[in-house]
Image (cartoon, grey):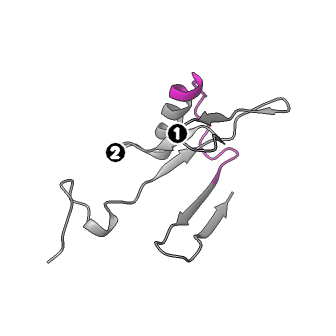
Amino acid sequence: MDVTDPQGAPASFSRIKVRVGALVFCGNDIALIRRDRTDPVLYTPPGGNLETGEDLVAGLRRELSEELGLAPPRAPGRNCCGWSTRWSPGPAPPRPRANCT
C-alpha cells in the first residue's frame, strides 16, 4: 500500500521543497536579503519556496516581487542556472548536483 499526503503525492516525496532564487545585479552591486531568523544573521539571494501548482518562472517572478518589489520581463532560458541538493539526515554532508546552462 502506497501512503500519500492529502494532495496525493507519495509520502516519501511530500517533504521535498522546490525553491527558486535569483542573483540580481545592478552595476557592480548584488541584491541580498537579510534573514534575521538565524544566528548569526544570514544574507541570501532573493528567493523562496514554490507554491502548489506554480511553475519555476512564475515562482521566481513572485519572489522577486515580494522581496524586492521587482517585476522582471519574461525571458525564459536567459542566463539561467539550475541545481539540486539532496540533504540526508545524519553525519554525511549534503551531495550537491549541478546542471547549469
Mark with earlier residue (1, 2): 1
Q: Left or right of 29: which side holds 98? A: left
Q: Is residue 23 above or below residue 73?
A: below
The N terminus lies in quadrant:
bottom left
> What amino acid is labelled 2 in the image?
Gly
Q: Is residue 94 above or below residue 74?
A: below
Farthest residue toward the top? 69
Residue neighbourhood size for the residue with mark 2, other residues' Cα within 10 Å, grouped as few (<14), some (14–19), many (≥20): few
For label 2, the residue is 53
Answer with the quarter of the image where residue 75 lies: top right
Q: Are marks 1 and 2 in contact (CB under 8 Å)?
A: no
* Magenta extent: 65-81
Residue neighbourhood size for the residue with mark 1, other residues' Cα within 10 Å, grouped as few (<14), some (14–19), many (≥20): few
> What amino acid is labelled 1 in the image?
Arg
Q: Residue at 63% of width from left, 40% of height from top?
A: 41
Report the Cα–Cα distance between label 1 and label 2: 27 Å
Instruction: Tell me which secondary structure the magenta stretch mostly adopts.
Output: loop
For label 1, the residue is 37
Q: Residue at 39% of width from left, 60% of height from top?
A: 16
26 is within the stretch colored magenta: no
